[in-house]
Image (cartoon, helix red, strand yellow):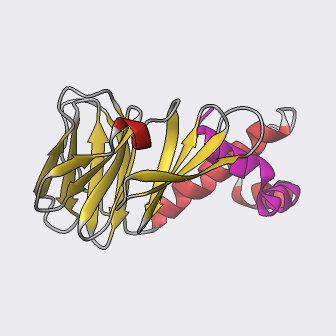
Amino acid sequence: SVVCKSWNLIIRRSRSLHALYCKQPAADAASNQSIDFERPLNILLEDIAMRRHKSALVRGTVHVDQWRGHMTVIDQCRMKRGLILTGAGDKVMRLWSSESYKCLQEYSLGDEVPLVDFDFDESKVVGLVGTRICIWRRHGSRSIFPARAGTFTKGLCMRYMDPEAVVGCEDGTVRVCDMYSRSCSRIIRSGEGHML
């Protein structure tokens, strides 16, 4: 597959690409391009999407900036208000300026278990580290939820909106935690299996 799994699903379900596919023979005859209509529909739609993206990049003005931010592959990235927060297997999260490309702050995970998910705002970074929620103040120290309140069977994803952090767990539950009292305020069961 040429594209990632999520983009591939979008391509396969796109009504506009299906409509474009139906119009394609006439457009291809005019442009001297050909599509092999013997191939499966999902492959044809992927090909059409890639051609459209390629032509948009060739025609448009694209400026690509690249810098090395971690010693290992970046697992996660979030962007808000001109700031980029990256996390990688090197057990460090880094906050970057999207304008100057400079690292503004580093948040060390220490010898803890791996970073599962994170998010941030103007004053703090909230991360799901192993089975605990950690809060790093932007210009201060880190705090960790105590084991009794912040331990999950296995957290798979996390988001927060003050004052609550929500963790989707492998056992099919969603844990809603109050970040200030550091306690789990609700457990929501949403059915069988994983929370994604």
Q: Is residue 170 above or below residue 167?
A: above
Find the magenta span and give its range.
Answer: 1-22
Q: Nearer the viewer, residue 95 or 147?
A: 147
Position of 106 with respect to 65 (left or right) is left
Q: Is residue 38 visible?
A: yes
User: x and y percent of residue 57 in the render?
Assistant: 46, 60
Q: Nearer the viewer, residue 30 or 180?
A: 180
User: x and y percent of residue 34 in the render?
Assistant: 75, 45
Q: Nearer the viewer, residue 128 or 23?
A: 128
Q: Quadrant of residue 145?
A: top left
Q: Is residue 193 above or below residue 58?
A: above
Q: Residue at x 22, y 30 (%)?
A: 90
Q: Is residue 2 magenta?
A: yes
Q: Residue at x 71, y 50 (%)?
A: 11
Q: Is residue 153 above or below residue 135?
A: above
User: x and y percent of residue 118 in the render?
Assistant: 37, 49
Q: Residue at x 72, y 32 (%)?
A: 193
Q: Quadrant of residue 19?
A: bottom right
Q: The N terminus is located in which quarter?
A: top right
